[in-house]
Structure formats: C-alpha cells, structure tokens
Image (tube, grey):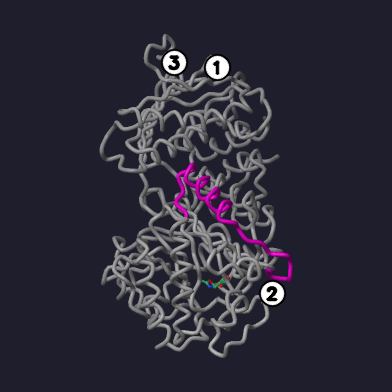
Amino acid sequence: MPRVVGSLLLVVAAGVSSIGATGPAPGPAPARPLDQVVPAPERVRPGGSPYTLTPATRILADGASRADTREAARIGSYLAGLLRPSTGYALPVGEPKGDRNARDGIRLRLGTGDRNLGTEGYRLESGRHGVTITAREPAGLFHGVQTLRQLLPAPVEKRSTQRVRWTVAGGTITDTPRFAYRGAMLDVSRHFLTVDQVKLYIDQLALYKINTLHLHLSDDQGWRIAVDSWPRLATYGGSTQVGGGPGGYYTKAQYRDLVAYATSRHLEVIPEIDMPGHTNAALASYAELNCDGVAPPLYTGTAVGFSSLCVPKEVTYDFVDDVVRELAALTPGRYLHIGGDEAHATSHADYVAFMDRAQAVVAKYGKTVAGWHQITGATPAAGAVAQYWGYDATGSAERAQVAAAAKKGTRLVLSPADRVYLDMKYDRSTPLGQSWAGYTEVDRSYDWDPGTYLAGAGVPESAVLGIEAPLWTETIATSDQMEYMAFPRLLGVAELGWSPAASHDWDTYKLRLAAQGPRMTALGIDYYRSPLVPWPAG
Ligand code: NGO
C-alpha cells in the first residue's frame, strides 16, 4: 500500500505523529491520527489502545427506543456495506443484548449521549475492545460513521479485498458542526445528469458530511422534472441541453427514488425552479406563458438573462401554482428554491410583483422560500433563505441590500462565486469551466471565513445559515468532469461549513487534504491534483 505509507510520511512532516523522522518503524503501519479527518473534528483526545478489526468483528446497533435501535441498525448495515468488500470480513449487524461477544466490535448507539451533540453531532471512542459511536439523532450517528471510515486506511474504499491491517487509533472525538447548512448544488439543466450520476455525487458528498443537495431543475436550456398538469415542460422543454444533446428529465418515480437515496445519506434535497428569468425551456413548451403568445425555440447556447415569464398574465400564476404544488408533494424537505437570479428581461416592478405572488404559493404548499440573493431586491417572505453568490467585485449597494434583508430576518447561505463556484477554472490551463469570477485555486476556495465574509456590509455570523458549493454545468457533462471540478475544492467547502473557526488554517488543512488523495483515488474520484497540495506520491 505505497499510497498509505506516503500519506503517513506526510503526517510526519506535519509533526503531528509520533513516528520517528526517519520514517515508519518496521511492522504494521501505525494507525491514522484521529485528527486526520476532513472536515476537521471539533475536539480530539488521542490516547489509549488502538482497535484492529478482525474477521470476528461485529457491528452492534443499540438505541434508546425500538425506533432508535432500528435506525442504528440501518446505519450499521450501511457501514457494513462500505467495509465488507475491502476487508473481506462478514461484519454481521445485530443488537448487543444477550450477545456474548458484545464487548467487542463497532457499537452504534442512538438516542443517548450529551445534549450538546445536537442533531448532527456524535462522539467516537476508540479503544482495545472496539469503537463506539454515540449520537442523539440519526444524522449524528451517520456523520460519526463517516469519521470512522476516514480513520481506516484509504484502501478501505476499494471494492475488492485488500490485505491491510484495519487499525483505528485509540482516543475520543467529540464533534458537532459549526453551520447547520452545508450544501452542494447540481445544475442538471444545462447538461442533464442521470439518476446514477446524481447518486454517485450524493455518496461522495456524504463522506464529507455535506447535508444538503440543491438541484437546479430548470433553466433556459432544459426542464428536468415531470409535471403532470403541464406535461410538455419535461417532454419538450427537457428534450435538449447545452450544445444540442438529447437532454432528459426525471419522472416522478425517478425523482422520488433520488430523494429517498439522498435521505438515506442524510442529505436534504432542495429543488429549484428558477423564475421569472431562466425560463426559456418553459416558454418554449407553452406559448400561453409568453406575453406575445408565441413560443420561442428551444435554446442550447449559454447566454443568460434573456427570458422571462409574463408577469401580468394570470395563466403565469396557474403555472406557478401547479408546478409548486406538484414539486412540494415530491419534497419531504423544508425548502423550495424559486431562483430569482438574473431576471434582466423582467422590469423591477414586475419582478417585485411576481416574487410576492410566487412566494405566497410556496407558503401555501407548506414550504419555506429559498432564492438567489436577488430576491432581497423584492420583499423576502418571513423566514426566507437568500443564497448569496456575489464575489469580490460585487458592489457595496448590492451587499448592503443583502445585509438589510438579513437584519429583517432573511437567513443567508453563502456561495461566493470566486470561492465556491465549482465551475470556476482553477487556473488558466483548466480545460473545463468558466472564469467570469476569476480563477479559483484550492487555497483561494478554502481561505475565507463564512462567519465574517459579509461582516463589512453589516451581516453578523448569526444571519449565516451556512454555505453551498454550486456546480453549474454549461461546460460539464460527465461524472469525471464533475469530479475534476468539484474535487478537491468540495472538501474545503465541507470543512468551512463543519469545522470550528479556530481550526481554520491553510497550512495544516492542505496536509489533511493531501492525505485524502489516496482515499479519493481508491474511490475512483478523478480529482484535480492541485500543485499547491503536497499529494503523496503514487
Ligand atoms: C450564475 C448564473 C447561472 C450560471 C452561473 C455560471 C447564478 C446564480 N446565475 O450564477 O445561470 O450558470 O453563474 O457560473
């Protein structure tokens, strides 16, 4: 396992390991230090005996109630599914009661533990007799399992049996997130992404404790979700994409399956229907949605800001009501995103009038409004979430408008385009992506603080719900291309969203990031080998 040895050498270079400076001692490789996890855990107390998995290791699920035990067992089965192929061990999942071997193994305990763990926190204790993960809520247990996964050697991610000593260092991790909202967005409109492509991305996000998947389901180039009351939206509006390919859309059954898959990985799905601009696919599908009653042709280019729903027409609100009603029925999550960006073909008065009515429809169907930060130029509904996608060149008036809304209770999700837009090129040689917000190398993407980012405009950290990394797909169509643009920047986003501000430090982060290289390789993630990160050789 040359790659693992490489990553351990790196850790030595960081001075956080007890391995001598001349390299690892002969014999079994020492376990990964407990703090070599992305995102960095809140508190780590190393020490005590390590635990090594054996062919007899069991996964023991236990809960404060029957329901908790069942949920812990579900998470246990997920963990077993991850570990069985590479370890070759049986890893049976059961309850500890009456089990003679209950002292040994991986114990998952749900519904107990310190109240401070909240909904997503967990505690992981590793010692001679095993690893115990305790959480109050399922999401916390699931995140603890992701930490355990990262504490095992990188080949654990491979899908064939590996000859490796599966040792977890001794000690305790107590871990809760800094921000409640840690998101990633996929633009499935510019290039349609299949259910399998999205599921693969979901699995990759879960490893780094991302808890929100925002799906940009409609834009000028394609409408990607079946709507029974307006069927041509999907069948015609979804029939192409950027460059003129065949496009595609999700049937309701496929979409439900996708949402259920995300839920099983503890991600909340936020569907977006972008309105009133970015609507050419809808306008092309139904002539009556256009002010002049004439349907434009389908659009396969990459320009923005040229389309608008017809704000004065009543049929527009029948359309909005039907679409929101059907989408809300497919959405167990709290939010429905109504876009609102780049409505350059809509007058300001029309924009404000449209947003008033569209937001009321979202509330009518029991959802909370999310929108791009331009909705702060209208009147954001109570409890609305505005997604800030400005960048260093964004004017102070625009920032002030966002800050004023935050003062009135609008919560902010930060997606600064020159930091976390995953479609921005890393440098001028990046073959994919765009550069309108500037080149965004891995250090620039990581090196900012969501808590103080808009402080200059008067936004306190308490108004920041979290952060999100959008992946726009004008130039991106395959999973390899998605991975190349998202990884490794997505790990930095995950860390900014989860880890305490005090742990923020590029020089130590880049070493932990480098140690993730072999893991991403083992997972088949085609990541960008940034020259700024000391990746292990091999
Ligand atoms: C902008 C625009 C999108 C583009 C993206 C490309 C927002 C919120 N609207 O971000 O339509 O796809 O840039 O980087």
Label disc, if present, on residue 94 of the rendered structure: none
Contact between marks 3 and 1 (CB within 8 A): the answer is no
Quadrant holding ligand 1?
bottom right
Check residue 317 for magenta coloring.
no
Cα–Cα gap, marks 3 and 1: 10 Å
**What span is colored magenta in the figure?**
240-269
Tell me the amino acid under the disc marked 2: Thr
Residue 424 x %, y %: 60, 66
In the image shown, does 51 or 2 lie closer to the viewer? 51
Query: Earlier along the polypeptide chain: callout 3 or callout 1?
Result: 1
Question: Residue at (55%, 39%) from the top-left corner?
Answer: 13
Question: Residue at (64%, 49%) from the top-left corner?
Answer: 196
Residue bearing mark 2: 300
Contact between marks 1 and 2 (CB within 8 A): the answer is no
Examine the image and state in which quarter residue 511 appears.
Answer: top right
Residue 461 x %, y %: 31, 61
Q: Is mark 2 within 8 Å of ligand 1?
A: no
> Disc 2 vs disc 3: which is toward the camera?
2
Label disc, if present, on residue 54 of the rendered structure: 1
> Disc 1 vs disc 2: which is toward the camera?
2
Label disc, if present, on residue 104 of the rendered structure: 3
Q: Is residue 227 above or below residue 267?
A: below
Q: In this rendering, does residue 456 appear at all?
A: yes
Query: Earlier along the polypeptide chain: callout 2 or callout 3?
Result: 3
Tell me the amino acid under the disc marked 1: Thr
Return the residue found at the far top.
Answer: 100
Cα–Cα gap, marks 2 and 3: 59 Å
Tell me the amino acid under the disc marked 3: Asp
